[in-house]
Image (cartoon, helix red, strand yellow):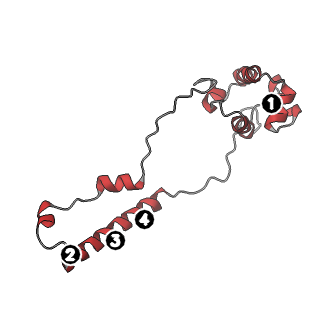
């Protein structure tokens, strides 16, 4: 859960960094001035929509930093390395390679080799289709945060 007092401090840091007062900041991110005033006074807690609006308008604001203080502000310009796995990379790793005997024997243009290549292509396409089907998941419709004080 977001500590409201710490969130307010981080929000004030953002205001100072960009040289904006509360009214200009609210106008810039597209929220009502009163909602920002209520946040800064501690009356209300920040919504996910509010935080995402800040992130959309000010991409230097790290989501983890504004939510819980971890990370840095402004964001480091160093690109973070993510491990991305593409379907093609998985296929290259897991696809069976032909044995040396099957490569060395026979004519490359014979009917037998053509059929084997077609079967390999079908097998590869089936593997890709299965991998894609497994990666598709249900779409999220709504996320609601319930706070201990009864608000959401």
Q: Given contact means CB atoms under 8 Å apart, are the residues at marks 1 and 3 in contact?
A: no
Quadrant hosting residue 98 = bottom left
Identified at 53% across, 56% down, the residue is 137
Q: Earlier in the sequence, mark 3 or mark 2?
A: 2
Q: Given contact means CB atoms under 8 Å apart, are the residues at marks 4 and 1 in contact?
A: no
Residue 33 in picture, x, y percent from top left: 88, 32
User: Can you tell which mark lies on residue 129?
Assistant: 4
Identified at 11% across, 69% down, the residue is 105
Q: Earlier in the sequence, mark 1 or mark 3?
A: 1
Taking depth in this image into account, of 42 and 62 the one nearest to the observer is: 62
Report the Cα–Cα distance between label 2 and label 1.
Answer: 74 Å
Q: Residues within 10 Å of mark 4 (few under 14, many from 20)?
A: few
Name the residue carrying label 2.
109
Name the residue carrying label 3.
122
SS of the residue under disc 3: helix
Report the Cα–Cα distance between label 1 and label 3.
Answer: 58 Å
Q: Given contact means CB atoms under 8 Å apart, are the residues at marks 3 and 4 in contact?
A: no
Quadrant hosting residue 88 = bottom left
SS of the residue under disc 4: helix
Q: Earlier in the sequence, mark 4 or mark 2?
A: 2
Q: Quadrant of the N terminus?
A: top right
SS of the residue under disc 2: loop
**Is residue 103 toward the left or the right of residue 135 in the image?**
left
The residue mark sitting in front, 4 or 1, is 4
């Amino acid at each position: 859960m977001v500590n409201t007092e710490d969130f307010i401090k981080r929000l004030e840091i953002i205001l100072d960094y960009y040289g904006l007062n509360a009214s200009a900041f609210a106008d810039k991110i597209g929220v009502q001035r009163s909602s920002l005033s209520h946040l800064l006074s501690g009356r209300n807690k920040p919504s996910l929509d509010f935080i995402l609006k800040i992130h959309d308008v000010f991409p230097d604001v790290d989501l983890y930093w504004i939510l819980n203080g971890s990370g840095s502000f402004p964001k480091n310009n160093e690109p973070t390395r993510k491990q991305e796995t593409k379907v093609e990379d998985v296929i290259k790793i897991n696809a069976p390679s032909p044995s040396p005997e099957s490569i060395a024997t026979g004519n490359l243009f014979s009917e037998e080799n053509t059929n084997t290549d077609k079967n390999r292509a079908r097998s590869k396409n089936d593997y890709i289709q299965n991998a894609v089907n497994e990666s598709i998941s249900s779409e999220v419709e709504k996320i609601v945060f319930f706070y201990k004080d009864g608000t959401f």
